[in-house]
Structures are given as structure tokens and as C-alpha cells.
Image (cartoon, grey):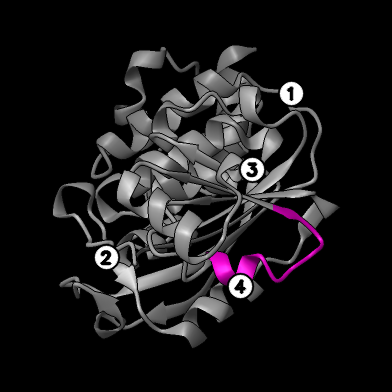
Amino acid sequence: MTSVKPKKYWGQHFLTDNSIAEKIVNSLNHYHNYKFVLEIGPGKGILTKYLLLNKNFTVYAVEIDECSVNYLVSELNIDEKKIIKGDFLKLNLNEIFNEQFAIIGNFPYNISSQILVKILKNKSMIPEVVGMFQKELAKRIVSLPGNKEYGTLSVLTQAWYKTEYLFTVNEKVFFPSPKVKSGVIRLQRIDKTDINYDEKLFTQIVKSAFNQRRKTLKNSLSNYNLPSFPNYKTIKDLMPLRAEQLSVEDFIEITMLISS
């Protein structure tokens, strides 16, 4: 029998509770009727075995650990052609999929924010995500304006996805047990096919505002040479506020006016 041990340097914590694994997999809504699901870091395949029961889509997995790859093939009889051996962060997703696909996984804490950033860069291909993050990060992603958790990742994610915090997972159902709780969230891409603002500038403005979140927008965005906007009462009202008080739509409006 092939054995797999979690490796600390890859931030591996294997989920051991089958009922929670099944609940995570069942959280996929099959949004946009995609044909493929990519699991990130299957480990010993506790999610994978439930994914394979669903015949509505074909399951692929990306796994960096050769021991896990061997285990999945020998113990779960997974088609080795469906396992992508490597680092998700380094993958060219366009070379693997030529149509939309969902993402699911128990994401390693040490790279989970980077995984989310890569998902956002490939959002046109990814209509749905169900992921387990460190609870603190999960709460930040779904947080709304006015909350202390609301930040850059909240705005950048919610500009493109409907975000939902689904449930909390206790640290005791992992091996080894992490020191923090986990949170499972679902992202479903918003139905919009085009945008009328500069997305790169939007990202820069959001980051600038939250990098100096104690300052008002008038000061944190001073490098953008903001005009007075005499005809835009809404914008004038926003300038005395701090980043965490603004909605996604507010940031979009500021971006449109700066680039106009």
C-alpha cells in the first residue's frame, strides 16, 4: 500500500472527516453548467472520491507531491492522465482547458491568497470556486464594507464573484491539526461580459486605498491627481471616507472618473 504523509513545507493538513468532505463537494452548484472540475492539492483524495461520484463533470487534479500522485493512482484508481503533476501557481490554465471549469480544494494556508489571485486573473475561465481557507482569510474575502475584515481581496474578488461563507471547519478534523479553524467559501462569477473601466487601474486604486487604510481617500489616492469632480456629488462625498467604507461600485466609479 502506498503511504502519504503530510509535508510541512507544502503546508499540508489532510482532512480526515468524510462527512465534511462530502459537504464541501456538494457545495458545488454546477454554476454555468461547466464540464470540468479542477481540484487543487487532493492529498489522499478525501474530496476526490466524492467528486468522482458526480457524472455531470470530469474531474482533474493538480498535485505537487509525487507521493500523493502515486497514492491517488494506486489506491483510488484515478486515471493518471487526469492528474496534473506540478504547482498550480505555475500552471498555464489555457494550455490545460479550452473551456470553462470549476475549482475546488482544501487550499494550503501558506499559498491560499496566491491561489485566489491566480483565480481572479483567470476569472473568464472559472465560473465557480469552492475552497477551504484559513477562517480569517475566508472571512476577509466575503466581508462587506464597514467591517474591519473588508480589504483589497474583498473588493477585487467581489468585483467579479458573488461570495458566500458556507461553514466553519474545526481544526481537530485534520492531520496534522492546524492551530486555526478553517472556513469554506463559495464564489460564483457575476454575469457580466464586459466592463467600462480600466481593470488594471481599478486594481491599483483599490490597493493604494487599502495600503493606507487609516487615511481618507483624498490622501491615500493623492498620487492619482484627483480632480475636484464638481459635477459628481457622490465622488466628493467619498473623498473624506476611508477605504473600508467604500463599496465595490464606489471604487469602480472612482476608477472611471480618473481614467476619463
- What segment carries the magenta color? 48-58
Q: Nearer the viewer, mark 1 or mark 3?
A: 3
Q: Nearer the viewer, mark 2 or mark 1?
A: 2
| Mark 2 lies on residue | 13
Pointer 2 or 3: first along the chain: 2
Disc 4 secondary structure class: helix
Does the magenta run of residues contain 75?
A: no
In terms of depth relative to the viewer, which is nearer, 100 or 79? Answer: 79
Mark 4 vs 2: CB contact within 8 A: no
Label at residue 50 = 4
Tell me if residue 19 comes above or below residue 219 in the rendering: below
Residue at figure coordinates x 81%, y 33% from the top left: 193
| Mark 1 lies on residue | 196
Pointer 4 or 2: first along the chain: 2
Tell how many labels: 4
Q: Is residue 105 visible?
A: yes
In terms of depth relative to the viewer, which is nearer, 253 or 238? Answer: 253
Disc 2 secondary structure class: loop
Give the residue type that dot 2 points to. Answer: His
For mark 4, does the 10 Å Cα neighbourhood hold few (<14), some (14 to 19), or many (20 or more) residues? Answer: some
Asked if residue 37 lies left or right of residue 140, the reply is right
Give the residue type that dot 3 points to. Answer: Trp
Asked if residue 53 lies left or right of residue 130, the reply is right
